[in-house]
Image (cartoon, rainbow, N blue to C red):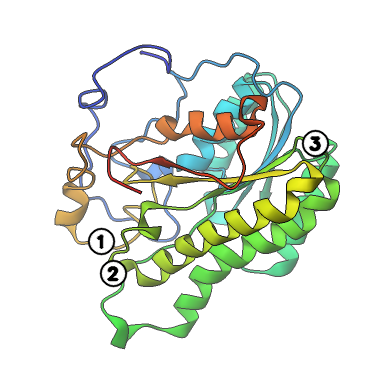
Amino acid sequence: MADQYTFTDPTARYADIETKPVSQDGPGLDSGMRDRADLGEESYRGSGRLEGRKALITGGDSGIGAATAIAFAREGADVAIVHLPEEAEDAAETGRLVEEAGRRFHAMALDLTEEQSCIDAVAGAVEHLGGIDVLVNNAAYQRQRDGIEHMQVAEVDRVFRTNLVAAIVLAREAVPHMQPGASIISTTSIQAQEPSPGLLDYAMTKAALVAYTEALAQELGERGIRVNAVAPGPIWTPLIPATDFPDEKVEQFGQDTPLGRAGQPVELAGAYVYLASEEASYVSGAVVPVTGGRGF
């Protein structure tokens, strides 16, 4: 399989992976996907760009988080991840791949809607890795909504606590452990710029994460801590079959991009590696779009 340094036709790179409808209950699992996403298991090749770094990645069991964990490990970083209890199978596979790369790994089954879980996540990463240099706020929750008149406050609260409040608490807890050169990277979304009515509350949190990135970058700049974000477009992850989209929307997922297909998690990993690396030493307050050509 081609690695990230092999030139290919981007429109045809993943012609063998189809976004077929396959509904999943709960948070969604890589192991439950009919057409498995490419996390870089066979294709990502490291070159020591994060040697000695210690990273905490939320939602690191599957999708973008798992691809980032694998890439970070192959670039030389030790990795801790946070996942939900029901995602333990995916988390174990991510751990196997991180340890196969010769790096330390620690997984924590925690519900980030709870403040104490966010506190415990940072404490666990510091204890098991010996510190924290990179915080990746990646865990997210979304569900298809049927209109404003059907919005339930409990569901909106879950979206906001998972996607946004957790990012604030995690940064609050992590920053005191960070040294100059450390970084915080959040996963926002093209939904921040092109919100879908059916993802109203999700889109709101992703737009807020852009403001979070820009404001926190100003606050932490003088301490030598960089704050950035990655904005994915339509990426084929377990979040999609678990969102309760109509079958036709899943089947056509990503086809409205200029590249004509959905992206794969490994295609974002390089953006996170870059932002965490010394190559991005003068990059802060930025949002890097990985959208298949759609504007951001």
Q: Quadrant of the N terminus?
A: top left
For label 1, the residue is 245
Is residue 283 left or right of 224 when viewed as pictured?
left
Most foreground residue, 132 or 86: 132
Extreme bottom residue here?
149
Horizontal and vertical percent position of residue 29: 43, 47
Amino acid type at mark 3: Leu
Spatial separation of the CA atoms under disc 1 and disc 2: 9 Å
Horizontal and vertical percent position of residue 268: 44, 34
Residue 174 visible in the shown view: yes
Callout in the foreground (3, 2): 2
Residue 135 visible in the shown view: no
**If you read the primary sequence from the N terminus, does the residue marked by circle 1 or circle 3 appear first?**
3
Indicate which disc residue 198 carries: 2
**If you read the primary sequence from the N terminus, does the residue marked by circle 1 or circle 2 appear first?**
2
Horizontal and vertical percent position of residue 138: 55, 49
Indicate which disc residue 129 carries: 3
Label 2 crowding class (10 Å Cα cut-off): few <14, some 14-19, many 20+? some
Is residue 74 left or right of 247 when viewed as pictured?
right
To which quarter of the image does residue 100 belong?
top right
